[in-house]
Image (cartoon, rainbow, N blue to C red):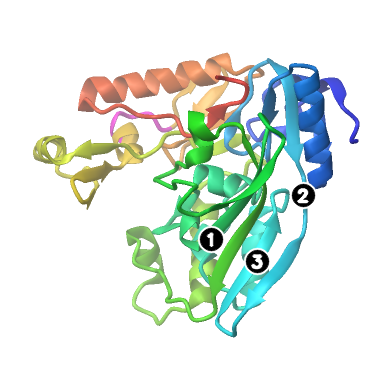
């Protein structure tokens, strides 16, 4: 069994670089190691909290129980019929490196998701998405293990209940499931997805292919979003909110420039536009700053604990409710929170 460490420093394992300690910590590089860690936690009656790449998570100063970091590696070819390719990918693989690996081999479907920080195992949990594509579009199954029973199973994409920045794994019914491997189906003949407004504007009228989309996505992200290795951050801090059509119509009358995207009987609003309209870009509180180039990104300049981060986020969300009557939901989760 992998060594279990006590009072383990997590400061370097979260991209916001907050000071945090795990009561117990283990890095598990095999399915057996994950199962052994779960068995230990069950025997000790300790809760289990999963930490991936630390890029979409907020860490309190002390996390009770066992923090488990699944570090399974490997890309396994499961099926190739000449067009579609099924791959089993370990949860500990770097997401961006996997996207590049696929692109180099002409396996398409993920180019729009380039440069999203984090691990492959975190991708289905968050159902990461960008520039008109969600990772759920390319997932056919997720292999998991339960912290309650210690048993493993393979969940179909349908069973994962993917939704906008959401999945079964973020809900109460699925929080006991740890992602071990993700099974992707990629398409050599997939159509190029370049209709998202900012991506289309960047590409212009020139003929595009998967390689040009990949390069454009990376260029756009690098120009707008800070590198967490240079400026500690967790990417987008708030989700784009959904409202009903009546509320969207009323908002359009008051704020004609507010971007809206309708899907069935719901409308998605731009959280960044609303935050920006209230003048938050560049504002700083207690060492935590709203990024100068992107209103959805909160950068940690000198804060050591989570409190000032949440305080600024609450202030931003409160101003949006007051001005637009729209509630914002935080995108990163607090590790160890029930």
Residue 12 visible in this rendered orientation of the protein: no
Which secondary structure lies at badge 1? strand
Task: Kindly report the secondary structure that dominates the magenta region of the rendered protein.
Answer: loop
Q: Quadrant of the N terminus?
A: top right
**Among the two numbered marks 3 and 2 on one chain, the one whose residue lies closer to the N terminus:** 2
User: In percent of the image, x 70 and y 71: which residue is there?
Assistant: 77
Q: Which mark is residue 270?
A: none
Q: Which mark is residue 140?
A: 1
Side of 42 relative to 199 (left or right): right
Neighbour tally class for label 3: few under 14, some 14-19, many 20 plus, Cα within 10 Å: many
Which one is in front, 254 or 266? 266
Neighbour tally class for label 2: few under 14, some 14-19, many 20 plus, Cα within 10 Å: many
Which one is in front, 137 or 53? 137
Which one is in front, 259 or 118? 118
**Among the two numbered marks 1 and 2 on one chain, the one whose residue lies closer to the N terminus:** 2
Residue 150 magenta: no
185 is higher (above) or lower (below) than 241: below
Q: Quadrant of the C terminus?
A: top right
Question: Could you tell me how far apart the alpha carbons at marks 3 and 2 are, in whole angstroms?
Answer: 14 Å
Q: Which mark is residue 87?
A: 3
What's the magenta region? 277-281
User: In percent of the image, x 22 and y 42: which residue is there?
Assistant: 258
Side of 231 relative to 265 (left or right): right
Q: Which mark is residue 72?
A: 2
Image location of residue 47, percent across then percent down:
69, 21
Image location of residue 82, percent across then percent down:
59, 85
**Which of labels 1 and 2 is toward the front?**
1
User: In percent of the image, x 50 and y 49: which residue is there?
Assistant: 128
Question: Could you tell me how far apart the alpha carbons at marks 1 and 2 are, in whole angstroms?
Answer: 19 Å
Mark 3 and mark 2 in contact? Answer it, CB < 8 Å: no
Question: Could you tell me how far apart the alpha carbons at marks 1 and 3 are, in whole angstroms?
Answer: 10 Å
């Amino acid at each position: 069994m992998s060594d279990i460490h006590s009072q383990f420093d997590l400061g370097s394992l979260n991209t916001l670089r907050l000071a945090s300690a795990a009561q117990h910590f283990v890095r598990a590089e095999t399915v057996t190691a994950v199962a052994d860690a779960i068995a230990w936690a069950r025997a000790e009656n300790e809760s289990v909290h999963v930490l991936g790449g630390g890029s979409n998570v907020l860490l309190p100063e002390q996390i009770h129980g066992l923090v488990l970091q699944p570090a399974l590696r490997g890309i396994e070819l499961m099926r190739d019929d000449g067009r579609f390719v099924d791959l089993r990918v370990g949860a500990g693989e770097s997401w961006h490196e996997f996207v590049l690996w696929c692109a180099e081999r002409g396996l398409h479907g993920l180019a729009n998701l380039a440069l999203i920080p984090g691990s492959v195992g975190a991708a289905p949990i968050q159902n990461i998405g960008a520039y008109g594509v969600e990772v759920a579009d390319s997932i056919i199954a997720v292999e998991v293990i339960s912290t309650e029973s210690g048993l493993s199973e393979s969940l179909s994409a349908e069973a994962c209940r993917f939704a906008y920045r959401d999945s079964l794994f973020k809900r109460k019914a699925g929080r006991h499931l740890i992602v071990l491997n993700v099974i992707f189906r990629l398409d050599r003949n997939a159509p190029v997805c370049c209709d998202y407004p900012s991506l289309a504007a960047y590409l212009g009228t020139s003929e595009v292919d998967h390689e040009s989309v990949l390069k454009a996505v990376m260029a756009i992200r690098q120009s707008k979003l800070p590198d967490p290795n240079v400026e500690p951050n967790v990417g987008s801090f708030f989700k784009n909110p959904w409202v009903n059509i009546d509320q969207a119509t009323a908002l359009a009358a008051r704020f004609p420039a507010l971007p809206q995207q309708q899907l069935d009987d719901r409308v998605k609003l731009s959280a960044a536009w609303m935050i920006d309209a209230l003048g938050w870009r560049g504002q700083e509180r207690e060492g935590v700053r709203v990024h100068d180039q992107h209103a959805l990104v909160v950068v940690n300049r000198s804060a050591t604990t989570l409190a000032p981060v949440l305080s600024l986020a609450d202030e931003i969300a409160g101003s949006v409710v007051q001005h637009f009557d729209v509630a914002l939901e935080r995108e990163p989760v607090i590790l160890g929170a029930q």
